[in-house]
Image (tube, grey):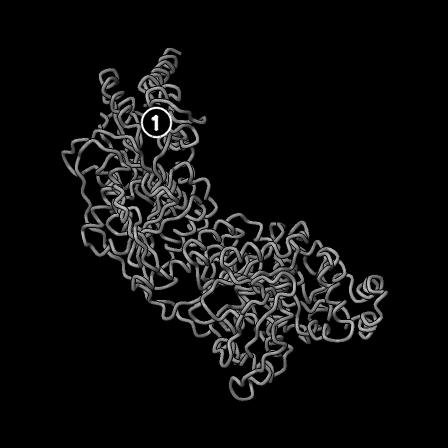
Amino acid sequence: MQCAIPIVRGDSASLGFNLPEVTCTDRYFGSMTCYSRDLPDRPDPRPLEAAETGQLFELLEALDARLRWLSSWTIHHANFLRGNDDGIKVGGHQASCASMSTLMAVLYACALRPEDKVAVKPHAAPLLHALHYLLGQQSLDQLKRFRDLGGAQSYPSRTKDCIPVDFSTGSVGLGVAITAFASLVQDYLLAHGRFANGSPGRMIALMGDAELDEGNIYECLIEGYKHELRNCWWIVDYNRQSLDATTADRMFRRFDDIFETCGWRVITLKHGKRQRELFQRPGGDALADWIDRCPNADFAALTYRGGAAWRERLTADLGDNRLALDLVHSFDDDGLAAVMTNLGGHCPETIAAAFAAADDERPTLFIAYTIKGHGLPLAGHKDNHAGLMTRAQIDALRQSMHIAEGEEWAPFAGLGDNVAGALRGLLERSALAVRRDPPHCEPVVAPTLRVTHDTQSTQVVFGKLLNDLARSGHPIADRIVTTSPDVTVSTNLGPWVNQRGLFRREAANDVFRLHQVPSPQKWGANPAGQHLELGIAENNLFLMLTALGLSAPLFGGRLIPIGTVYDPFIARGLDALNYGCYQDARFILVATPSGLTLGREGGAHQSINTPLIAMGQPGLTMFEPAFADELAAIFEWSLNHVQADEGGSVYLRLTTRSLQQPQRTDESWREGTLAGAYWLRAPGDGADGAIVAMGAMLPEAIAAWSELVDDIPGLGLLVATSPQRLHQGWTSARSARWRGAGADASHIDRLLAPLSDRACLVTLCDGAPAALSWLGSVRGHRVTPLGVESFGQTGSLEDLYRIHGLDRDAIFDGFAEHYILKANRDAG
């Protein structure tokens, strides 16, 4: 069976040369896989301009060598030449850079277009810095401070690096999957007329083969297939070595099967041009078969040992094939080692032809066979992942590249004036040199949001607020895009979707509606829809929110993403949530239902530690409102905050418990709600106690306050809407005082000031009690923290609150303990 992998005839603007049309035959399985031995031997270079461009592939080989040298030298300098006061290992990955240098040279110098976006393999960060250094976009100071304070980052970072970085990478696999979701976001913007980045581009991931072990890769594949993913390339540095092991041989072809099933084209680059030429000579077929059968571990070990070892092994294994042996013995040791390691991922001609073969919208996986540490003395060694060349080895490498001592940092040292000039010209015409950032997106100010004061839950209020926005015609509603992992209805997004519809590139009817099946959900799907329905994979939810939340800086079209999920299941996608916040993606996460207040659904659906997770997550502001008007104020603030230059993402922890709404006499609560807390019942001066409650626990707090206020004169009732904002304000004010900068008292400090120094705080939280227990440190008050510290179970709220110590009796006991201790102290 043949697979039609057309390689474009005629001009390829991105590559700059002509390629013949070919049909690739899969020699092994007859699947939709293109192998490098079936690609054209050498595309004919088309003159780019004048004398600079005569030998494109020689220039790419020169660029490959420069990237390999600069990345190695940057890491060497950080570990051996720069001072290291603390003695902690600096590290770096010279071998991981060397295995991908050819792929990056060809991609960035020839195939990449200005509109394309790239996620670079974490351990290849020095290569990315080297590319920008050659273009004059990265400073020598940054390279010299690699992995040091203020210098080039260990892994590519949108927020920490000085060079342009499309996607942060570092948490393995997430930098790959984000490209697929970014491609879906690009389609959404195109369909809604909000794409301001010129032509649509490819979202490209440069990945290590060990990242294929990550489960988020396959969750992403499934979601991409559902949404007809396009314009996405994943380029695998298939060096078959990870930190601890060599890749299992049985995985050969399994990756092909998985990706092809999900609609991807798979192009495998196993053999370079020199190997393919070798296979055409007498005895070459036997040598090709031997290479294909050679176990990964053996291939790596022979690579490290060199030409003599190759000769010994091949002589033993091919002893009955005279033609094959004659072919082997036609090379000296160095030549034999060079041809045996001439894999597709180190051959510019092979890589260029493969990239040209994917000149359409179909998602494509390139499996590029490489050698970890290619071109370095570490090549093939099983310990080379974090291995570092010695001073003698780096010096020998420098001499082999004709770089004079003292010229190690010179961008084009050792190349000669002609090659250096031509290479400089090639880079100056590359996508990195000509790309421009998309235009700045002006924020859309949110309207004032109001709600009725009926008895209702915050989850229901959230659904009403979104529905009101959908009907309002306000411009901000057109910016909102919602998404959920198959809990759209149960998180009250249904009314919004009824108004705004599901997003699909091609319209699809609601079949149940056509069949006149009664349902409150009337979900038509079309290119104008504003809801992206996901499968049950929370990791995908956070990656989708991240991609949507980067729509403005990536594509010039601002979106306001809102994602809903059951609160306990945040933990399933924490790595991706942290990843999104790390690169300053902007989104609103609505987590509901929450806590053991969910009651009858049992412990598996009851969250405990999510308030603590939110408190410790940079870039994410957490709120847990109790009342409808609080949520309206917080939601309005959130819509503006995610658009602000100094803003961030927001996490709303909501509940399904209906609460009687308070009757407000003024608006004083509003400012406190946004700052993190306000007095629902103000304390008297010098009061001996206060109840501090958040979220769904307000009914218990109000009931307890009503019974205790006569016994504890001046007892206060504090509503905590955001322990995180309270804590951040308190620590910031304290730090400013320590630095001598001077600062006003924090919001929580001012709130607690009226209380007696010996007052007791009983805190109440449907979650980990530590979320509020720190309040005692603000002014030295005694705290009795009530909360949930064990797994929940099925039951009524009355039973669950009693078992976990969240009812009125527990609040009474908290104050009783305090007064017993106080009496004992006074008596003593």
Q: Quarter-wise, where is residue 478 in the image?
A: bottom left
State whether residue 414 is above or below residue 734: below
The image quarter in which residue 79 lies: bottom right
Rendered location of residue 456, percent (x, y): 23, 33
Between 507 and 301, the one nearer to me in the picture: 507
Viewer can see residue 808: yes
Q: Residue at x 53, y 58 (%)?
A: 260
Query: As shown in the figure, which amino acid type bears the numbered disc 1?
Result: Thr
Residue 80, position as x, y percentages in the image:
66, 59
Q: Residue at x 17, y 37 (%)?
A: 452
Which residue lies under the disc numbered 1? 763
User: Picture coordinates of residue 67 (x, y %)?
Assistant: 60, 69
Q: Residue at x 71, y 59 (%)?
A: 380
The answer to which of 154 and 555 lies nearer the viewer is: 555
Looking at the picture, does residue 535 appear above or below residue 349?
above
Q: Is residue 188 left or right of residue 789?
A: left
Closest to the observer, 197 or 537: 537
Tell me which corner region of the image, top left, top right, bottom left or bottom right, holds residue 763.
top left
Across and down, in percent, residue 668 comes to 19, 38
Which image quadrant: the C terminus?
Answer: top left
Disc 1 packing (10 Å; few <14; some 14–19; many ≥20):
many
In the image, taking residue 412 as reference, residue 732 lies left or right, namely: left
825 lies above or below 82: above
Toward the front, the furthest residue is: 515
Residue drawn at (45%, 44%), measured in percent from left and top?
573
- Considering the numbered disc 1 on the image, is that residue within a helix, a strand or a loop? strand
Does 639 sit left or right of 773 as displayed?
A: left
Camera-side residue of 33 and 513: 513
Position of the N terminus by quadrant? bottom right
Name, please, the residue furthest toward the top. Answer: 827
Q: Is residue 825 left or right of residue 325?
A: left
Q: Is residue 145 visible?
A: no
